[in-house]
Image (cartoon, grey):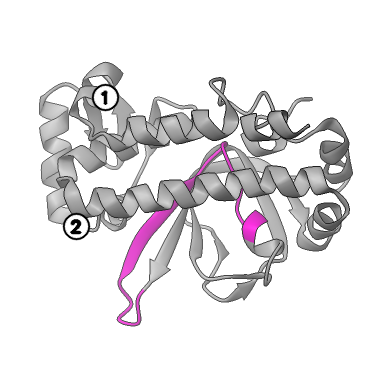
Amino acid sequence: MISQNALLRSLKPTDYEALHRHLEPVGLRPGEVLYEPEDTVDWVYFPEAGLVSLISVMVSGDQVESAVVGREGGIGFLEAAGAGIIFSKAVVQVDLVGQRAPARAYLAAYDASPSLRRTIAAHVELTLAEARQTIACIAHHPAQQRLAWWLLECQERTGRDEFRLTQEFLSAMLGVRRSTVSLIAAELKGEGLIGYSRGAIRIADREGLLAKSCECYATNRRFRELIEGPDHDGASHPRRLQKQS
């Protein structure tokens, strides 16, 4: 069965086979914590459905969401190939279904294959580019535009039109108070762009949400096209790797 995870699907067949024998299915519920800051990475997760939030935890205890990961990427694949320590809190936000591999097995495959290392490097490039765009977005764009962007990202990364996102998560994701989240969500609902009730969000008008979103959604899609090619669902190898092979 072909994996629905884009990172796994972008691997060359030999690299995928080297990992496939170590993969095991995993299913986790919202609120379950994969990692706390400074944990040793024992497993590398490859979501096929659902959403994981990577959260930076301040000394004060305040939490700010710094990234979300869905079927386009993985959790721990950067850290396992480096120091083996994760510095963010990784929490399931939308029911997670996917596969995971022991970090040791992943690292062995990574060390043995130059093509696997190049593929992972391409995904690292994409992750860094998206993180920098998020920083710029927080500095320059209003919360309503940013919420529209992230809802579109959540839709794309989960493959769903409806999902549950708590106000706490949305607050951390946007860096605003929960009361602000309620106000913005009510505005988007009033415009017929989303359905929103008790944490359940439904994308009602994707085109309208696109028009409401800031430029960052289109920018991130462009990043993916440049690195992975126009068909950036993970079905093909990253464009840069195709040129090298």
Q: Is residue 171 left or right of residue 23?
A: left
On the image, the x and y values in percent for residue 69 come to 51, 46
> Would residue 120 be counted in the magenta stretch?
no
Q: Is residue 2 above or below residue 118?
A: above
* Residue drawn at the location 13% of the way across and 54% of the way down: 179
Q: Which mark is residue 18?
A: none
Please state which amino acid type lies under the numbered disc 1.
Leu
Q: Is residue 12 left or right of residue 28?
A: right
Residue 234 versus residue 94: which sits nearer the camera?
234
Q: Residues within 10 Å of mark 1 (few under 14, many from 20)?
A: some
Q: Which mark is residue 176?
A: 2
* Residue drawn at the location 24% of the way across and 58% of the way down: 175
Check disc 1 and report its element: helix, strand or loop.
helix
Q: Residues within 10 Å of mark 2 (few under 14, many from 20)?
A: some
- Identify the magenta region: 58-78
> Looking at the image, how many numbered discs can be counted on the residues?
2
Q: Is residue 202 left or right of residue 189?
A: right
Please state which amino acid type lies under the numbered disc 2.
Val
Residue positioned most to the front: 244
On the image, the x and y values in percent for residue 164 come to 38, 40
- Distance, label 2 to label 1, CA atoms, is 21 Å
Residue 200 versus residue 98: which sits nearer the camera?
98
Q: Which mark is residue 210?
A: 1
On the image, the x and y values in percent for residue 188 come to 16, 31
